[in-house]
Amino acid sequence: MTVDKAYKMQRDDGIYDSIADKYRDPGTVYAFQVLEGEVLAGRDIKLQAFRHLQDLARAESNQGDFPFHYSLDKCREVLGFASLCPDPTTGRPLPLALWQKALLCWSQGWRNENDERRFHRVIFSVARTNGKTYLTVILLSYQYLIASAHFQNQDMAYIAPVSQQSKKGWRYVKTTFNRLRHNQFGDWMRKNKVKVGEESVKSNTSQNQLLRLSDESGQFDSYHLAFSVHDECGDDGRIGLIKENNGKITSGQVQTFDSQSWNISTAYPDSTSSLFLDEKMLRNAMIHDDQRALDDNLLVNYSQDSEDEVSKPDTWIKSNPLLPTAGKTMLDSMTSERDTKKNDGSISEFINKNLNCWLTVKENRFLNVHDIHNAVSETPPIDIHGQTCYIGIDLSKLSDDTAIAFVFPYQTSNETHYWIEEHSWIPLNHTAGNILTKEKQDGINYRRAEQLGYCDIAKNRWGYIDDDSVVTWLADYIETNSLSVKFICYDPWAISDVLDELNQVNKWPMMPIRQTAHDLDRPTHQLQKAFREGRIHYSDDPIIQYSLTNAILVGNSAGLKVDKERYTSKIDCVDAIVDAFSRAIYEYSDINPDFDPASVKKDPLSGMSDEERHAFLMNVSF
């Protein structure tokens, strides 16, 4: 099922007939245009358009478990303000494109039963030079002058990763408020004694304040922000504080009336960013529309559906929705930039920033993010019960995780594919038993992974992993699923105790794999190739995905192997997968990797012609 098919089924069943007659606002009109194909859009925008229409259908049918309604009055209010808000550069209001109006309507029009904004959290991502700054200024100005006008002691904020970035964005905010002071809102601002400064816009009457903040300052615990715009929040890979600060912002909004936080950004090279993971989470929620998860989160992501579209300028509207109104000049400039980047070898930067695609641009990255996530399968392609499997074990060293990987080779259409599973054990001995510190340090939500059955968090008071429990879990898993274990492949470093225990449980074939580039080069290349060819499959396991994202290639003249970029990066399950893969690749091969030519006696007839062989055999005496 695709979003296009789902929409057409609903449309043809008449689900949207009354909606099309009643709702003529830009948000609904745009949703219909996207799904009818009148506007070329990427998958995420199609999902949001479908979600909007589905939610309107739920609201119109008064479903008891859907406590939201779509207020056309609020749509008119925010659009009316936007038509008066001056552009920071030109000093006069600019006409908004339909997609920009739709974004404002979706975010401000949907309300809950208390008439608060439904979406407490909004993620908006678009390529560079698509009017993001103007929309940011409209949102902040609207919140201060309209949405918060009848309240007191309201805190609002414009946030950027570092102070220097926040100053640049704040200049636009200051310019806009100063121009509004001399336009329609001058009397109101003078009456409420609104002062526009370098750090805040503040009313001495209502005590409402709009603050300039940065992630590096970390001053979020003391505020209960009714509204915030977090600019360039995809830069978490470099800053490392954005996820933590977003948590402080949203936790402070729990008891704040009608609160809303915006995360606005283009895509960044580091796909371990919390924004990338949040986009993925919301995308999955929209795909499973019937489950109605994350009803108070909105994702509006303008992005290409594939990196291959870099060669198709007619599709760039997916990530650059301003193209139709910007004219031919913008497309010509982008095409020129694309060609320049292609010639100087930095085309990935164009794909990343100008087409708003997350990818890892480092040359030594093991896999790109699309290959990693394209391998995710909602349901296993095979029943593992009784299947042949290869097992890899990577034991904990210091603060590393212990990981066991299962590789199940199988064939489909005469092509070898691999189903992969893993289970990890998470030590807490280096974080004083604190799982929160461990999660922050590693960037993985281990508690959620444990709930999903992908890991066990150390429970003893010292935070160490119990090797006995690892062996017991493995033995039980093999027995429960009646697995046919060909090899248990392991890093021989510090595994002796576990090895002894495994041999006592069962006589499974054991294979030490030295962790050298010479020994790991072939399985590393074969695993990378299988990923790129779409022959690797695994469940939506956050530990596998995050570990693969962290993996880089290192090596020497002897070959390549995977490693991690930073000490805190986790690739333990990748190491275990590579170990298992070192033997799994031979399951359907005629090659015997353990064949030793020296063990076979030389054939005395080798090198002879047929005539010579015959003469030799005829002269053999007994």
Image (cartoon, grey):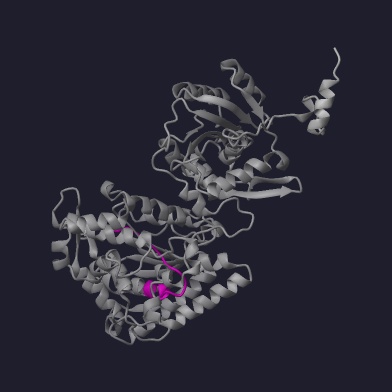
In the figure, residue 447 lies in which quadrant? top left
Tell which of 85 and 491 is nearer to you. Answer: 491
The quadrant of the picture occupied by the C terminus is top right
263 above or below 99? above
The structure residue drawn at horizontal position 70% and vertical position 38%, both measured from the top left corner, is 519
State the residue at coordinates (49%, 30%). 459
Left or right: 289 with respect to 263? Answer: left
The correct choice, above or below, for 47 with respect to 74 in the image is above
Quarter occupied by residue 147:
bottom left
Q: Residue at x 71, y 48 (%)?
A: 555
Residue stretch in magenta? 119-137
Nearer the observer, 139 or 496? 496
Residue 128 in magenta stretch: yes
Tell me if I can see residue 462 in this picture: no
User: Which of the 4 image quadrants contains residue 6?
Assistant: bottom left
Left or right for 405, reference 154: right
- Left-right relation of 607 to 496: right
- In the image, residue 68 lies at what x, y percent? 20, 56
Q: In this view, does 297 lie to the left or right of 356?
A: left
> Does any portion of residue 209 appear in the rendered image?
yes
Q: Determine whether 78 is above or below 514 in the image.
A: below
Q: Does the magenta stretch include residue 544?
A: no
Indicate the position of residue 548 as horizontal and vertical percent values.
Answer: 55, 46
Q: Where is 348 relative to 384, above or below?
A: below
Total marks placed: 0
Q: Position of residue 249 (x, y in %)?
A: 40, 57
Q: Residue 19 at what x, y percent from top left?
A: 16, 63
